Image: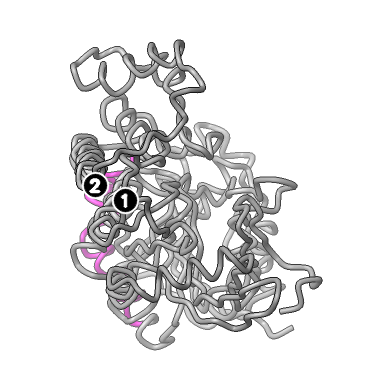
Amino acid sequence: MNKNQTPQNRSFRDPSGYVVVEKENVTRFLQKNEGAALLNTCSNSSVVKKWIENDKLISYSITEDNQSDIVLCHPKIDFPSYPFEWSASMLYSAGELTIDLALDLLEEKKGLKDASAYNILYKGHNPVFIDLASVEERDENNPYWLPYSQFIRMFILPLYLNRFYNISINSMLFNNHDGLSYNDCKKIARRYSLFEISLIHLPNFLSKYKSSKIYNNHALKNSELAQFIVKRLLNKAKKQLKKVRPKHTKKSNWSTYIHQLNHYSTNEFEKKCSWVKELVAKIKPEKVLDVGCNTGHFSVIAAKENAQVLSIDYDETVIDMLFNYAKAEKLNILPLVVNIARPTPPIGWKNSEYFSFLQRAYNHFDLVMMLAVIHHLLITDRIPMEEIADLAAKLTNNYLIIEFIEQKDPMFSVLTRGRDNLYNHITLDFFKKTFSKDFEFVDETNNSYHPTRKLLLLKKKSS
């Protein structure tokens, strides 16, 4: 790539180089000296080779080696996601990956110079460490792991507040890209257990008396002792991480929704599942987006038909449940905490460091599923029908499976709360007229499926 070409996304915070992300390519530019040192470190590391082979560390190839830069090419992760879009278990898995890599590298007297959660991307339910430039040769006499504080801020503190104070990962990390501060945590933490005191209150108290001298590296004469100290610190971080492992017993308003379907009989729900399964098997989509996935029942159906599934819901608890299920069953599902009515905006410096959800999602999927979600968008979020149709057309390249719910449906009445007259125009004819601008109607369920609900298969019109 020509360096003067305008990239879609460019990182610039690492002084040793930068990464350019384009539609199909990921290119890393490294300054000559730093790049040569990195390549030497990686090529001589059996840990790096093993982690790349196991698809836990991003692979690389050299595309250019000139007088000023060394240029590496990385395979692109299909759908990049960010820590504030993850559930607690996803953040935990990313932290586990980080500390395990640091421990493995330490055995070769190598290390990680960075412990940011943004070093991780997910391929389905599997975390992958992508910041190859974080791998470094360690000074054998250095007894410090400098990213330890960053690891605490990015992983331990958010997971602690999530587990013991039920604060969502999204609300903590969206506006705190470098992790949480001890002072902010102190304002919330009130359990005063020994672990909380040592993790939050004591470090916050000692931070008032910090001196610039503490940031000076003090090398030891005994390299074995230095290695022992660093390993002990990494193991301490791993033990702390285990103490804040997310509970799998949490519940939310939506976590038991699929088991309490008062508006579906068992027979009706089974018909819905069969209809969706048959269509997915017939269409054979490679990439599926499940909007408002809840605990992911239909995401699982699509994944079992060999689709690569992105599942989104604004409820972190159901996303966490789906992540753990997909991990246990080895299903190709990436669940993210995203509210389609208020999706992730572009953020970072000049709004260009992190893509918005829609920038990542537009025209990315062969099939979009919007099951039991359109009435929430219409009523709860007050999104006009034509806007929903327009969004659906931009998300899918081909097919849309959508569920239409009539005004006389009990759930529709619950949502309108006596304001039914405002939605008298929401009829099946109005729905079809609105969506027919961008879609052709291919198939739909008959009245035997459900008295007030209809499933429809739409195909996007060619432009």
Taking 12 as reference, is 366 above or below it?
A: below
- Image quadrant of residue 58? bottom left
Q: Which residue is located at x 38 percent, y 14 percent?
A: 206
Residue 314: name its quadrant. Answer: top left
Name the quarter where the N terminus is drawn.
bottom right
Query: Where 1 sits versus 211, above or below?
Result: below
Q: Main secondary structure of the magenta part?
A: helix
Is residue 449 found left or right of 417 in the rendered image?
A: left
User: On residue 227, which mark appears?
Assistant: 2
Q: Which segment did they paint magenta? A: 253-278
Label 2 amino acid?
Gln
Q: Looking at this view, is 196 or 13 the one in front?
A: 13
Q: Secondary structure at mark 2?
A: helix
Which colour scheme appears in the figure? Answer: one colour
What residue appears at the point 30 percent right and 12 percent down from the top-left corner?
Answer: 190
In this picture, residue 363 sits left or right of residue 282: right
User: Tag 2 or tag 1, which sits nearer the N-term?
Assistant: 1
Where disc 1 sits, the SS reads: loop
Return the x and y of residue 19 as percentages of the image width and height. Answer: 61, 64
Which residue is at 68% across, 65% downward? 434
Is there any visible trace of residue 432 in the rendered image? no
Is residue 267 located in the magenta-colored stretch of the structure?
yes
* Image marks 1 and 2: residues in contact by CB distance under 8 Å: yes
Residue 131 pos. (x, y %): 47, 60
Identify the image quadrant of the C terminus: bottom right
Residue 126 locus on image (x, y percent):
32, 64
Corner quadrant of residue 147: top left
- Viewer-proximal residue, 168 or 3? 3
Quickly name the residue at label 1: 140
